[in-house]
Each structure stands twice: as structure tokens, then as C-alpha cells.
Amino acid sequence: MSAQATIFPSEPKWELEGTSRIPFLTYTSEELYKRELEHFFYKGHWCYVGLEAEVPNPGDFKRTVVGERSVIMTRDADGQINVVENVCAHRGMRFCRERHGNKKGFTCPYHQWSYTLKGDLQGVPFRRGVKQADGSFQGGMPTDFKPAEHGLTKLKVATRGGVVFASFDHEVESLDDYLGPEIGQYFDRLFNGRKLTILGYNRQRIPGNWKLMQENIKDPYHPGLLHTWFVTFGLWRADNKSELVMDAKHRHAAMISTRGTGGEAGQVTSVSSFKQTMQLNDPSFLDIVQEPWWDGPTAVMTTIFPSVILQQQVNSVSTRHIQPNGHGSFDFVWTHFGFEDDSEEMTQRRLRQANLFGPAGFVSADDGEVIEFSQQAFESKPFHRALAELGGREVNEHTPHMVTETLIRGMYEYWRQVMEAPDVPAAAGAAARDCGHGTA
Amino acid sequence: MDFQAYHELTQLYADYASAVDSGNWDLWPEFFTEQCSYRLQPRENHERGFPLATLSFTSKGMLKDRVYGIRETLFHDPYYQRHVVGAPVIRRAEGERFECEANYAVFRTKLSEVSTVFNVGRYIDTVVRTPDGLKFASRLVVYDSEMIPNSIIYPL
């Protein structure tokens, strides 16, 4: 009977010091997942909502999510970006059903409460009741009803380089501080102020815990092993010059690599799947042209915790939005883009290289597959743990190679700090902590 | 379009479905001309005028490279797929060149699992007559399915 409790524990058990052994329970517990939503997606963090180029004109809107909560990004008449929650202030209906469009404001169809693009309540039908023949009114809202108090929930919004982030937490630190200088420089390398052009979307539902996708892009161990397409055609080589960086809190990261060019690829690739003689029938998949803004690296994959991955893989650039729905599933939305000054040739090149990525991509479809099969095992064996000990058990903020899982350990170090912090009454955060309330 | 040509066209559609459900992926590129276009695109991108496709191949060589990827490099859960393709609608027939469309539904069956609806949409095609019979000069696969259930590996 104690075996039962061992197989289905209620609390994650971390072996050893640190975070090199990750309990499967962190991927399977609905309770921990709810806690993650609250502490990572709804409090104290910035979440990706989209690109300014998706709502170029006043009145444009895009429906998306922060965590599991439906939100709408709008551009108002002043040209400002707003993000409001898609929950009517009256009866709570998720009123916005279109995914994009252009409107002067929003009206909930249920009782026609109407809102501006900034989320302010504008109209309430029969607010003052129905006028009778004798001049009196029947019904209506109470006389002390104040529309100003019943707008849509407004999120705090920040943009950087045309990328829009939002937070339900108006006390959140600035986006610049949130990203930090180490990751900020790679963010700015991709989003350096040029106007973006939207090339389109890919949407997939991956039956795995959302963190597995963050881990996948913090894991430089797998690309040369799982993605044999990369290796077969010489895009991944063991002599790639590589670097890993993370922010001071170890939650965001960048994997930076520069394709090796010296010598024969076969001499520098120790991976068995490399085939010296293998040629593409159509080499235009790998028609790679160096762009000036790369400033060296041929690929930079940036994870912004918790909600987005920024991709530059040679000429293919995209954002990948992580949208969790339950502890064992997330939607993964890819927005491929280009830049306003791209030639038609470059646009075609970006679109062609998009064949490598996305839910059917030569080197991305398999990422979704391995995540699904990991989750399957976690669910059946929640007392066990995964290993992330390549390169040691510590967290190294800067690593000049790819043979390490330090970025994963770093993320879980941060995860533990937040998830294991004593619960603090929301209204009296810092004061309560100072008083030592609820310390372990 | 005469009856003989229509019969050949419906045979092409039936043969294609049979081939991509057979597991013999080498059959697939042979339905296309050398300078063909095969694109798999979400309906969202198609209707909003966004050029991105989930897969976009512009030569028979690329289709062969995809077959190599499926067989040799793309790790994936093996599955059966089963196409159910509606009768083609002929939008335009000019000599030996036909523009047509057909609805499709593809069911997926993973080993030890129940069968599920995998992907639904329509083919928007240009078919041309070649010395080797009718071939697709272009096949645009526009899918309604809003969420790809994890991945698409095999040709639709």
C-alpha cells in the first residue's frame, strides 16, 4: 500500500542538490500546472501576444492567449497597442469569436454591452431602465453603477522592436529588465527596428507539457542526434562554433551557433547518420544567403520564459508561441515573418526554408514527436525523474560549446525558486515576506 | 471535357489516394510533372493571402527529397493514413489542361490506437496531359483543420 504512494506522489522529489534530476511529476501534476499558470503566466512575467505588424491599422485586432486566458490585442485610434481580456464585464462571456479583424469597438452579443478598443465600457442597454408613459423608469442598473469600474480587464503592454508582450500583473518589472542585457542583445539582433511583414501561420497541438518545448530549445544536445536531416545534409556539424547564454535569473536563454566551414564535413562530424555522398535532389532547400544583420551566427534560438521562442535558423525567422492547455498539452503557434526591405528573392528563400520547420518540417516535426512520447512515459511513471547532467550538475551562465544541458538546469533552478517560494498574500507581498510570514 | 478524359481524371484521383495510403512513398512523386508545385497550406493563410505553407515544394526533386526524409531522417511515430477523396469538380478544361478541385478527409491510425480524423480540406489542382498520362502540374492542399495533431509526416 505504500508502493501506491510511491508511484503516484503528490509532491515532486528532487534528487541530489540542484536541478539536474527533474521529477516527472513536474510535467504530470495538474496542481503544479495550475500553480505554474498563476505564477509564470499570470503574475510577475511578460507573455508574448504577437507582432505589431499583425495589427498595422487602427481598429485591427488579433485574438490570442496569455496562458489559458483569451485576450485580444488591438490597435486603437491613437495607434496604441492594447491587450484586453476576452471576458465580458457583465456575465463573463468570451465574446470575441473572430481570430482577427478590424472593428471600431467590441460588443458582447449576449446583452450588447459595448467596449472601446482600449477596453473601456461604453454602452449598457437599458442602463436607466424603460421609460413609462407617466415619465417614470422601470428597471435599469442601480443609480450608483459606474461604467468606469466595469471595463474589460486590461493587461499591461510593452513592445520592443515590433514584438508585443503583455502581463495581467501591472506591478511586473519593465520588459527591458525582464529580458536582461544578455538576452536583450539577441532579441535586438533579430528585432532591430525594421518593419516586419507577416508571411503566415502554422498551428499544431502537441500532447506534452509546455515546459518540454522550452527545454527542447534549451537543449543543444539533441539537434545533431535527433535531427539527422541536419546532419545528413551537412547543416549541423560537430565543428559548428557555439555558445550558450542565459539571463541573470536563468529563465531565458539563447543558443548561438555558427556553421563550420573548414575542411570536409565528414572529418568533423562524428555522428553516424552523416552520409558523405548524400545529396539533395533539389539543393534549393539549402539556398542559404548570409544576411548583414546576422553579424556572424548562422542560427540563434532564443527562449523567452515562459511563452515564446524566437527563431533564426539561417534565413528562416519566426516566433513560436507556447499556449498551454492543461498539464499535458499545448498549442504551438508559429508566425513566420520577413522584413520590409526583403527582396522578392529573399521572401521566397524564407518561405522555402520554412520547409525545414513547423509541424511538418524536416527538423521540427520530430521535436513534437519526442515531446509526445516523453509525456506518455511521465504519465505512467510519475515518481521517476529525467536526467539533465550533460556538462555537469551546476548552472553555468555562459558556455562556449553545445555539450551541456546547463540551460535546462538553469530554467529549473528558476522554476524551483518561484514554485517553492512560500505563498504570500497578494495585497501585502514584500511586507509579509519581511515579516517572515509563511517561510518554510 | 469528354467522358474519356473525365474517367482518366477520376482514375488519377483514385490512384493518388491509393498511392499515398499504401506506405510506398516512392509512388508519390511520380504523380507530378518535373517542374511541379505541391503545397500544403492552412486555410487561414490561403484566405488571408499569406504565402506561408506548411510544406512548399516546387520540383519533383523536392518531393523525392521529402520521401528520403520520411524514410531516413524524420523520426516519427509510424501510422496508417486513409484518404477519402470526393469526386473532382472541373473548374476549367482547356485542351489537355484541367483545373479542378476535390474535397478530402484523411484518417490516421497509430499502432495500438483508435482511428481519428487527421486532416480535412480540399485539393486545388492543375492537371496536364503528358506522354506518361495525366500528371499534377500543381497540387495545392488547403486544409481546414485548425490544429495539426502534433505533426504531419506523410504526403496528403
Image (cartoon, coloured by chain):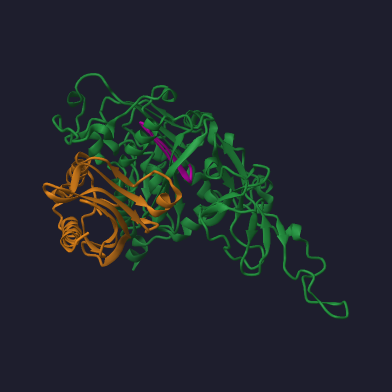
Chain colours: A green, B orange
Question: Residue A7: percent from the left, percent from the top?
Answer: 34, 61
Say which of B143 and A311 sits in front. B143
Question: Residue B144: percent from the left, percent from the top?
Answer: 37, 58
Q: What residue do we see at 34% from left, 66% from top?
A: A4
Rendering quarter of residue A242: top left
Rendering quarter of residue A409: top left
Q: What residue do we see at 76% from left, 69% from top?
A: A127
Say which of A130 and A14 sits in front. A130
Q: Residue furthest right?
A: A134
Question: Residue B113: percent from the left, percent from the top?
Answer: 24, 65
Count of numbered tags: 0
Say which of A67 and A100 sits in front. A100
Residue A74 shows up from this direction: yes
- Position of A422 with respect to B104 (left or right) is right
Question: Residue B94: percent from the left, percent from the top?
Answer: 25, 52
Q: Quadrant of the N terminus of chain A?
A: bottom left
- Position of A181 with respect to A402 (left or right) is right
- Residues shaded magenta: A305-318
- Residue A4 magenta-highlighted: no
Q: Main secondary structure of the magenta part?
A: strand
Q: Residue furthest left?
A: B132
Say which of A37 and A393 sits in front. A37
- Position of A8 with respect to A165 (left or right) is left
Q: Indicate whether B138 appears above or below A376.
A: above
- Residue A312 magenta-highlighted: yes
Q: What residue do we see at 44% from left, 57% from top?
A: A11
Q: Residue furthest bottom?
A: A133
Residue A210 shows up from this direction: no
- Position of A176 with respect to B48 (left or right) is right
